[in-house]
Image: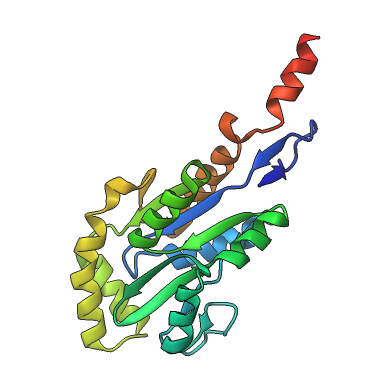
């Protein structure tokens, strides 16, 4: 999907970026995603569908689209998801139409998804996908963050910690891997990656025409 590169006096067209953030739960990807959306008007979040219950402070249609299992299975059968995964007894899926609408509006798409979703998305969209994995400084720090967050009972936190090791083992399926020692520094690194990826030569679909004009 062609875009105009922001702040580009030559009006080059470029392909949209499908920008993936993944991390173990509690490592900070949601905080960084919110900061990216606030800082970058050319980026829009892909709002996933989920069968899990809504949490205090969440808003349907903003954080997730909250639906029941029967509806989710119907959407899977109708091929309405670009990717979907089964995590902690609940299902999560990225709506195909939602992503297409964001790209058609001239914005890049931000995904807050796990390694399974990132892999599925890459298989579908290849070079348009940029994958960033965020690590905690240590598993001990990750556990303390989950406890401080206080959104889940102890048994769910224990399950998240057990899953974290598996998630970290998939680090090599990502284009960039960052350690979130300090959230502001990590955010700046993630935003720099996004800006650089927008300028990749392979995404500059208007570059060939511009160069041909120079050579006349």
Most foreground residue, 94 or 42: 94
Image point 51% across, 73% down: which residue?
Answer: 78
Whether residue 175 sits left or right of residue 147 in the image: it is: right
Colour style of the rendered protein structure: rainbow
Quadrant location of the C terminus in the rendered image: top right
Q: How far across and how far down the image is residue 118, in percent? A: 40, 56
Q: How far across and how far down the image is residue 173, in percent? A: 32, 48
Image point 54% across, 46% down: which residue?
Answer: 194
Q: How far across and how far down the image is residue 160, in percent? A: 25, 74
Q: Using the rendered image of the protein, determine whether residue 77 is visible from the camera's viewpoint.
A: yes
Image point 56% across, 62% down: which residue?
Answer: 35
Q: Which quadrant holds residue 144?
A: bottom left
Image point 28% across, 89% down: which residue?
Answer: 153
Image height of 76 relative to 12, above or below: below
In this view, the residue farthest toward the front is: 77
In this view, the residue farthest toward the top is: 216
Q: Which quadrant holds residue 60?
A: bottom right
Q: Using the rendered image of the protein, determine whether residue 189 is visible from the camera's viewpoint.
A: no
Whether residue 208 sits left or right of residue 115 in the image: it is: right
Q: How many marks?
A: 0
Whether residue 160 sits left or right of residue 191 in the image: it is: left
Whether residue 21 sits left or right of residue 60 in the image: it is: left
Q: How far across and how far down the image is residue 85, in percent? A: 36, 70
């Amino acid at each position: 999907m062609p875009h105009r590169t922001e702040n580009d006096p030559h009006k080059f067209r470029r392909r949209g970026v499908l920008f993936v953030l993944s991390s173990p739960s509690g490592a900070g990807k949601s905080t960084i995603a919110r900061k990216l959306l606030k800082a970058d008007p050319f980026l829009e979040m892909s709002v996933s569908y989920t069968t899990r219950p809504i949490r205090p402070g969440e808003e349907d249609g903003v954080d997730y689209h909250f639906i029941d299992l029967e509806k989710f299975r119907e959407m899977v059968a109708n091929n309405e998801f670009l990717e979907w995964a089964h995590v902690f007894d609940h299902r999560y899926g990225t709506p195909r139409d939602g992503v297409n609408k964001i790209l058609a509006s001239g914005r890049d798409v931000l995904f807050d998804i796990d390694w399974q979703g990132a892999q599925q998305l890459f298989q579908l969209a290849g070079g348009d996908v940029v994958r960033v994995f965020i690590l905690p400084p240590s598993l001990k720090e990750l556990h303390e963050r989950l406890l401080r967050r206080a959104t889940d009972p102890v048994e769910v936190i224990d399950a998240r910690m057990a899953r974290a090791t598996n998630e970290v083992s998939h680090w090599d399926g990502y284009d960039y891997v960052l350690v979130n020692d300090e959230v502001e520094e990590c955010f700046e690194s993630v935003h720099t990656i996004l800006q650089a990826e927008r300028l990749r030569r392979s995404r500059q679909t208007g570059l060939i025409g511009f160069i041909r004009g120079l050579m006349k």
